[in-house]
Image (cartoon, rainbow, N blue to C red):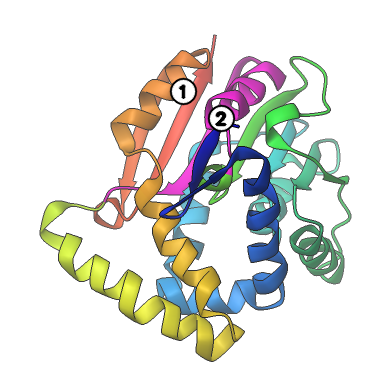
Amino acid sequence: MSKTHFGFETVDESSKAQRVRAVFDSVASNYDVMNDLMSAGLHRVWKRYTLLVADARPGQAVLDIAGGTGDLALGFAKAVGPKGTVVHTDINLAMLSEGRDRLINQGVILPTSVCDAEALPFADASFDRVSVAFGLRNMTHKDQALREMCRVLKPGGKLLVLEFSKVAPPLSKAYDWYSFKVLPKLGQWVAKDADSYRYLAESIRMHPDQETLKGMMKDAGFAHVDVHNMTAGVVALHVGLKK
């Protein structure tokens, strides 16, 4: 049976999705609070920048993959207006439910679907924009997921991948200390789950760096890929343009 990584652990490919699902089932109810604490609120800045670069226009169709608690979906809904469409998806029902409830509380009702990014249930060339924020690193077959994202984009459409990436070398020791010493304790204190946040730190280290992911996106069919490093490379926004 083929193997893959779950953080630093090597596991059967068939078990990874289930284990990732268990992580997000555990953290869903505290996800937004932990994001604010972990990033000192910077995740909101990173997402606002993503929306700015996406430049979604009124009337366009947007697919938000691994949309979780709905930050990007809400921003896209405002951008495309009542004549546009934003489809809010996640493979994890607990996360999707948290996001749907949060959106409804703000008066926003969007099409919502549990779906796997590696086999998207949408027709070719359906969307003007596709986004995935902090979700790609959890996917078993990232290359297949990227091909699917390219497939459902219209010609001239944009893919926006916001993800933790490789930090600048001068900050690497401090970042490692924070990731492996502070983050699990924070997870235990707030979410009563140190292991899930230890996995988070490990999954970031196993994710392709900026140049590798850029190459993967080109291999998946994107004609041009820009990389926007933020916070010294803690996070990178990859923007792929479909021919």
**Magenta range:** 139-166
Seen in the image, is 68 located left or right of residue 10? right
Residue drawn at x 52%, y 37% is: 3
Image x and y of residue 222, in percent:
50, 16
Q: Quadrant of residue 148?
A: top right
Q: Quadrant of residue 39?
A: bottom left
Q: Residue furthest left?
A: 170
For label 1, count other residues whose C-alpha is less than 10 Å away and answer few (under 14), some (14-19) or many (20+): many
Q: Give, as a three-letter code, the residue at label 2.
A: Leu
User: Does the magenta portion include 147?
Assistant: yes
Q: Dot 1 lies on which element?
A: helix
User: Does the magenta portion include 83?
Assistant: no
Q: Which residue is mark 1?
A: 217
Seen in the image, is 225 located left or right of residue 19? left
Q: Which residue is mark 2?
A: 159
Image x and y of residue 229, in percent:
31, 45
Residue 68 vs 28, above or below: the answer is above
Give whichever of 182, 168 is nearer the camera.
Answer: 182
Inter-mark Cα distance, 2 to 1:
9 Å
Upstream in sequence: badge 2 or badge 1: 2
Give whichever of 28, 35 is nearer the camera.
Answer: 28
Residue 148 vs 203, above or below: the answer is above
